Image: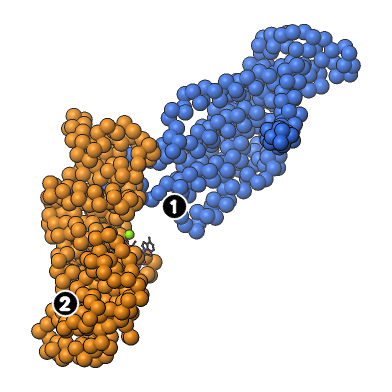
Amino acid sequence: MDKQSRWAQLRPYMMIAPAMAGILAFVIYPILYLIYLSFFKYNLMNKDKSKFIGLDNFTQIFTRADFYKALSNTMIYTASVVLLTMFISLLIAVWLNKKSKINVIVQAGIFTPHIISIVSISLVWLWLMEPNLGFLNYVLKTLGLPPSQWLQSSKTALLSVIIVSVWQGIGYYVLIIVAALQSISPSIYEAAALDNASKWKVFYKITLPIISPQLFFILVIMTIGSFKVFDTVQVMTGGGPNNATNTIVYYIYGFRTTNIGYSAATGVVLMAIIGLLTFVYFRLLSKKVHYQ
Amino acid sequence: MASIAFERVTKTFEKNVVIKDLDLKIEDGKFTVLVGPSGCGKTTLLRMIAGIDPQTSGKVLIGGRDVTRIAPGQRGVAMVFQNYAIYPTMSVRDNIEFGLKNNKVGKAERNQLVETISSTVGLYDYLDRKPSTLSGGQRQRVALARAMVKKPAVFLMDEPLSNLDAKLRAQMRIELIELHKKLGTTFVYVTHDQVEAMSMADTIVLMNQGVIQQEAAPDVMYRKPSNLFAAQFIGVPPMNVGELGVEGVRFGFRPESAVLADEAGDEHFSISGRIATREMLGSETLYQVRGANHAFMIKCTEDLFTVDQEVHVGVAAKQMYFFGADGKRIDEDHHRYRDYMEALRGKRNG
Ligand SMILES: Nc1ncnc2c1ncn2[C@@H]1O[C@H](COP(=O)(O)OP(=O)(O)O)[C@@H](O)[C@H]1O
Ligand SMILES: [Mg+2]
């Protein structure tokens, strides 16, 4: 009896043990180790020569100009990508929401970039954006507009990376928003028509609030994702020209062999920023989100 | 206030003709109930009045004015949807005053209207609640208040009570009748439930497969159904019908106009049979009596018989109906009426 009841008590813990072990090994431990590393001047060649230096790495981070450059790049990138993607996805989703054969095809087309590796996409855009032979400048010239240096000028490089990220992300978010829009009962729109509501009023008084949980989700997910941008930068610019597209994760990556303690500290800072931002989002916006 | 008229109205959904060349007049200020089985086109008709799914051809007139080119919001109609269609993210107050805001009604007047209407429907204490926190009956009242507050000339309701439990439904029926009396506007009420139609309507419009079967007051509809469909749709259980065996004519009588007895009586129509089922409903009892050729439902106010008992069913001559081969009711002054009556007497104990 006693044995049995003890087993009954233990069983739930046994059941979640494998998953917890995984989380401990692959999530909790790495995070703790990252924090641990951030307090050291770590020597990769000889572990014994690693030196505990307290908060020195952090002091260094906050006094180095290149960190602030990477941080501001990342913030500009994140803000632009999030806002542009959300705005364009919403626009396209509202348009695609009207059921027709063409729309189904367009929707599939828009989604396609999402299933292609971001590395391939970056490479293709690299060619498209080539200043002399690239397709984009060809189009600009044909339209009688001045060509751009795209990735090769520090003025336009970040914008170019942003364009590629937005282009890649839109399809997925359009899909989420279209699904949200289609869950709205048509009779709500009919009631609004009988209430003499203008199209615009229907959109911001009815449609937007109803899909606000999905929009909020997209906002949080995209902010976190964009803050961690790496692959596009790595393939397309390598952080250049002149650090114009250097982002935090790329910055961390830059010290992977030379100063891993410093990398780790920057990683901790990034984690803190993302955590803080998410917290602020929930604080400021969750009241405006209508969960039903 | 306004009357409504349909003139040769046809409605098709992708080649599927739902309503064809329909003519109908709905009187100003009356409580008109559109009733019929599911899928007969009642909602379609209502939506054409509202303008949210306009007719394919023909004219719809509201207050004598052709509204074909007028947007739903400007027709002076309000509608209560079957699923209520309340704006889920707005508070009760916002739901009610959304239409007023769109019609640029001033804040003071708006507040006053919202408060009066919400008191009328008993939602005053719930004005700041979100619809998700309300019960089914309360949501229904929000939908009602939202329609009332606009002071529409025409009030459209699409099965507004079908999602409520039986008790609440009975209560709301009475409240709607009172509301109609108070407002005096044109009500067009759609239901598939003939009890609702009978209890609320000034005029019933009975439809089947997109065609109007009969337009009449409830008592006329019950006493003088124009055809077999009307006779069997109105009344529970439906009218008993049997073959007369002459010219394809069928006879019929209502379950409540028959009398059951142990001995054969001297009624005009009389058969014997055995009680197959008995349903005791409280104030009345339903028996199914199986004879040699027919099975009839009989409704009695007294509960005197048991299953498997041999009984005699009797119906007085003036309670009998006859329907021609085309389903139309044969009137008493029809030249063959007496012959059919005689034929019926011949079926005694058959
Ligand atoms: N949007 C639509 N598209 C195609 N067919 C429809 C549509 N709406 C209604 N119908 C058809 O029209 C007929 C009448 O429907 P409806 O008016 O909703 O019936 P009800 O009397 O039950 O309210 C049904 O056969 C239905 O299938
Ligand atoms: Mg319907």
Give how far across and how far down residue A179 sits, in percent: 50, 47
Q: Is residue B93 left or right of residue B24?
A: right
Q: Is mark 1 within 8 Å of ligand 1?
A: no
Which residue corresponds to the image point at 65% horizontal and 22% vertical from the top-left? A271
Amino acid under label 2?
Gln
Image mark 1: chain: A
In the picture shown, does residue B286 fall above or below B265?
above
**Mark 2 Cβ inside 8 Å of ligand 1:** no
- Vertical placement of residue B348 versus B173, above or below: below
Q: Badge 2: few (under 14), some or many (20 or more) residues near its Cα, within 10 Å?
A: some
In this orientation, which residue lies closer to the viewer: A70 or B79?
B79
Q: Quadrant of ligand 2?
A: bottom left
Query: Chain B's shade in the image?
Result: orange
In the rendered image of this protein, which colour is used for chain A?
Answer: blue
State the image quarter where residue A243 is shown. top right
Q: Is residue A54 left or right of residue A44?
A: left
* Image quarter hosting the C terminus of chain B: bottom left
Q: Position of residue B88 (x, y in %)?
A: 38, 40
Badge nearest the viewer, 2 or 1:
2
Residue B319's disc is 2
Q: Which residue is mark 1?
A: A98
Residue B340: image location, x then y, percent: 18, 88
Residue A247, how many percent across, how many down?
66, 25
What chain does mark 2 sit on? B
Q: CA distance from mark 2 to mark 1?
A: 57 Å
Specify whether residue A211 is in view. yes
Find numbered disc 2 in the image and state the secondary structure of the residue it sits on. Answer: helix
